[in-house]
Image (spheres, rainbow, N blue to C red):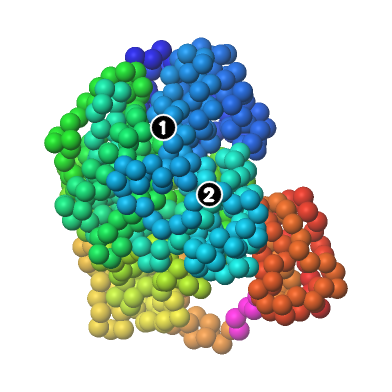
Amino acid sequence: MFNKLLIANRGEIACRVIRTARRMGIPTVAVYSDADARALHVAMADEAVHIGPAPASQSYIVIDRIMDAIRETGADAVHPGYGFLSENRRFAEALATEGVAFIGPPASAIEAMGDKITSKKLAREAGVNTVPGAGGLIEDAEEAVRIAREVGYPVMLKASAGGGGKGMRIAWNDDEAREGFQSSKNEAASSFGDDRIFIEKFVTSPRHIEIQVLADGHGNCIYLGERECSIQRRNQKVIEEAPSPFLDAETRRKMGEQACALAQAVGYTSAGTVEFIVDGERNFYFLEMNTRLQVEHPVTELITGVDLVEQMIRVAAGERLAHAQEAIRLNGWAIESRLYAEDPYRNFLPSIGRLTRYRPPGELSSDSAVVRNDTGVYEGGEISMYYDPMIAKLCTWAPDRDGALAAMREALDAFEVEGIGHNLPFLSAVMDHPRFAAGDITTAFIAEEYPEGFAGVELPEPLLHRVAAAATAMYRVAEIRRARISGRMDHHERKVGDEWVVRLQGKTWPVTVQADREGATVRINDHTAHRVTSDWVPGRPLARLEVDGTPLVMKVGRITGGYRLRLRGADLRVQILTPLQAEMAAHLPEKQPPDTSRQLLCPMPGLVVGLHVGEGDEVHEGQPLATVEAMKMENILRAERKGRVAAIRAEPGASLAVDDVIMEFE
């Protein structure tokens, strides 16, 4: 076994590898950039080496800097994680020259499968179905348009060395092909140091299902079931589950056997993933092979009991696979939700800043439920603009899909994140969506169900009643405390008031509270009664209650006359008023937001990489105005309507905060 393992990565995947290495008794080395000096993976490792400035192009993907760290620490093995250098043939070759083990496949397999054009050719030769497309790299935007016309719109522009949704654009017409080519090329260069682009036909309404394979250097290859990865936004996976609610056993077997055949055809070793598009008739087509550990690998671990990182390390050390194909059994159901530093209310634009509060739900493991949280951040840490916006991967397992969904809903409600924008509300909304609950999903799910973006959730009235009852019981407890502190009542008096009015989500209800030592009974509209019990005390930001014997978990913030409550994707301002206060409040005017209709505001913290218009220019609806880069993604800001540019308030190269003015219009 290895004497020292260097992890050539950062964030949650570096922490994940360190945990397994520690359990195996292998000392670890972390590498870090200027931005990651206080990162969690640095604190967890036995040693840490600084490798350069914050941009990945000057640190994490500079092979020479990683090699220097290896020599400095004497590491004899390297795990690349995912992204960065994980699928870089030159890196694997450099390690081999140095006599250092690469915990991944041979350089020849990386080269064969890492290039998406070559991989499709090899897949066809191995008897694997491939999606229709055009071979060859694209040299410029006009060639992209010409080939897109030949293949037929819509098309997908992809980075040949890409992954993780970076360097990918869908084009439905010539203009989008031109824009998509340049954006894909820029993102690919920034993320992978390789700006080669190719085009293939975009298959509408597909499912994205992938097969996990594991192979050793002794000719053995097994598949560990599939992962359903169809819930995607901008080609980036958001929610994954294993197994797929769509596949049957026969299709699973065929896909697994083809995945192994492809792996063995290229002499593959280590963990890898073969991705397929699957249509409504369960026909499947090869997309690509990821020659690395996938982000979503935990769901496979949860349903198989196989530690993929451990197996990668053992295979790299020359050991045989610990499991035969017939020994692999899929047990229960697992779901993963990716928590991103992005604001769902601003079209999921990246958010950076300090995590003023970061309290994941408690991890647990039993025969009936598992909660697992893979993360690389901590409370008080910074979310940087230089890297992927992932904060954590929250996973739940249960004996069946309904149980895994229920566990995920509760875990999301209990996940406390403050200080930055994040997608917890959106994840909760998806978990409660009828289509997702039924397993009726495709890669177009988010675009179809949230065509105007995410604007929050309106809870159904039965759940609102439960929330209203809980909020009233909580408010009564707080009122008793305030009264005692102020001296308005003695310690033996238990009654503050029985009659209240609750206002939330545009609705108003009179309520009556009857409290006792075990809890409170809250009657709404004089006919609906709910029993509320809890050990919540005022000031606690997370409330765990039972309403009518069913758990209710809410994030709690104090506001004047009530609470800000967040649960199930909803962000509610709940007011609990006396009848007189409610009567007076009905006559108060609502505060109107400022008018910013004549300004282009920066929607996220980022870097201005391009201005496409000048002062005095006339613009039309949909015209590109500026490009802002954040977290390795380029975002093109477009005109919402026709107008004329009155003033430019930013310049290329400027770092902007949220709502900084980029330009103004007449």
Mark 2 and mark 1: Cα distance apart in space: 20 Å
Segment tinted magenta in the rendering: 589-595
How many residues crowd around disc 2 within 10 Å: few (fewer than 14), some, or many (20 or more)? some
The quadrant where residue 603 appears: bottom right
Residue at the image position 42 percent from the left and 53 percent from the top: 237
Amino acid type, callout 1 = Ala
Using the image as rendered, state which of residue 662 and residue 308 is in the foreground: 308
Q: Position of residue 242 (x, y in %)?
A: 27, 49
Would residue 527 be found to the left or right of residue 11 on screen? left
Q: Quadrant of the C terminus?
A: bottom right
Mark on residue 136?
Answer: 2
Query: Is residue 269 at all visible to an observer of this figure?
Result: yes
Q: Earlier in the sequence, mark 2 or mark 1?
A: 1
Element carrying mark 1: helix
- Which residue in the structure is indicated by mark 1? 109
Would residue 633 be found to the left or right of residue 661 on screen? left
